[in-house]
Amino acid sequence: MRTALIQGASRGLGLALASAVLAGDPLARVVATSRFPARSKGLSQLAELHGDRLQRLAMDVTDEAGIAAAAQRLAESTSRLHLVINVAGVLHDGTGLAPEKKLADVDPVHLRRAFDVNAVGPLLVAKHFLPFLRHDERSVLANVSARVGSVGDNRAGGWYGYRASKAAQNMFTRNLSIELARRAPNAIVVALHPGTVDTELSRPFQRSVAQERLFAPARAARQLLEVLEGLRRGDSGSFLAWDGSPVPW
């Protein structure tokens, strides 16, 4: 039985990934985490459909003690995971955090928020859930990144906090792939660019996106899962787009 942990599963791409995993394999189990899982109508609907194949777990990626506590709770029901996907990210919110158009817009408080959620959070999830990936079966740790986090692909500038926090996440991912090759040799570690997904995160910035390149969450989830299913051990440490093509670091 395949067990997947999807961090940031209350809505959008994370919820779509949880739904796709459960629908695609009648034996699969999903551990869906979010800050307030009981408030998610989408997760409640999935629970009605799939019963105890879905486990909801409260976890805030900016709170390391909470991440550790979530890992301890999960250990009461399972000792292994076959897939961990870090999905939650922040580009804008109601506190004034928004993509910077110019240097004068940079705010250190908002920068720290972006790094805490987009970079540090996924790394802490890896830190506390690593024991679940150390087993004799194939496992995957995937961090949902973004092409705008690519240093080599940056030709437009701006968006300082989001770009830099995703670039930091990419470095953490690459580092993890090197360490886990020793500590969890059956684990594959990758960064994923999902394309532009029609969610609250991207909605204010979709005007310039071609319609055929704006993916519904369900489609984006299917595409990413296809990439993950096709991974081989030699792919660990890669940064891959939704179609499996490499993205420059």
Image: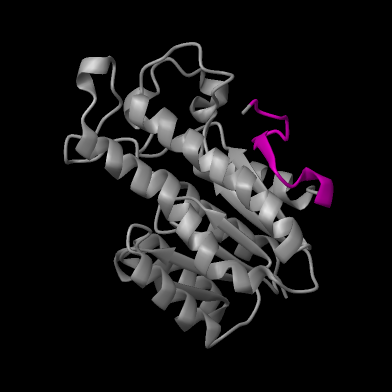
Confirm whether the magenta stretch covers residue 8. no
Q: Quadrant of the N terminus?
A: bottom right
Where does the magenta region start and end? 233-248
Specify the farthest residue to the bottom: 76
Q: Is residue 218 left or right of residue 118?
A: right
Horizontal side of 88 relative to 132 (left or right) equals left
- Colour mapping used in the image: one colour
Q: Quadrant of residue 179?
A: bottom right
- x and y percentages locating residue 203 in the rendered image: 35, 31
User: Who is closer to the viewer here, 172 or 191?
Assistant: 172
Q: Is residue 212 visible?
A: yes
Question: Which residue of the protein is positioned furthest toward the top in this rendering?
Answer: 155
Residue 81: tell me if it is visible. Answer: no
- Percent across and percent down for residue 59 are 38, 67
Q: Identify the residue shown where x is 29% and y is 36%.
A: 111
Q: Position of residue 104 (x, y in %)?
A: 20, 16
Identify the image quadrant of residue 102: top left
Q: Residue at x 55, y 46 (%)?
A: 172
Does the stretch in magenta take in 240? yes
Query: Which residue appears at 24% of the width and 40% of the height?
Result: 93
Q: Is residue 245 above or below residue 19?
A: above
Q: Is residue 95 left or right of residue 10?
A: left
Marker count (numbered): 0
Residue 11's place in the image compared with 31, above or below, is above
Camera-side residue of 228 and 239: 239
Q: Quadrant of residue 224?
A: top right
Q: Tell me the residue at 66%/68% (across/down).
A: 133
Residue 249 placement (x, y as % from top left): 61, 28
Q: Is residue 99 left or right of residue 89?
A: left
Q: Depth check: 121 or 40 in front?
A: 121
Q: Name the outermost residue toward the left.
A: 95
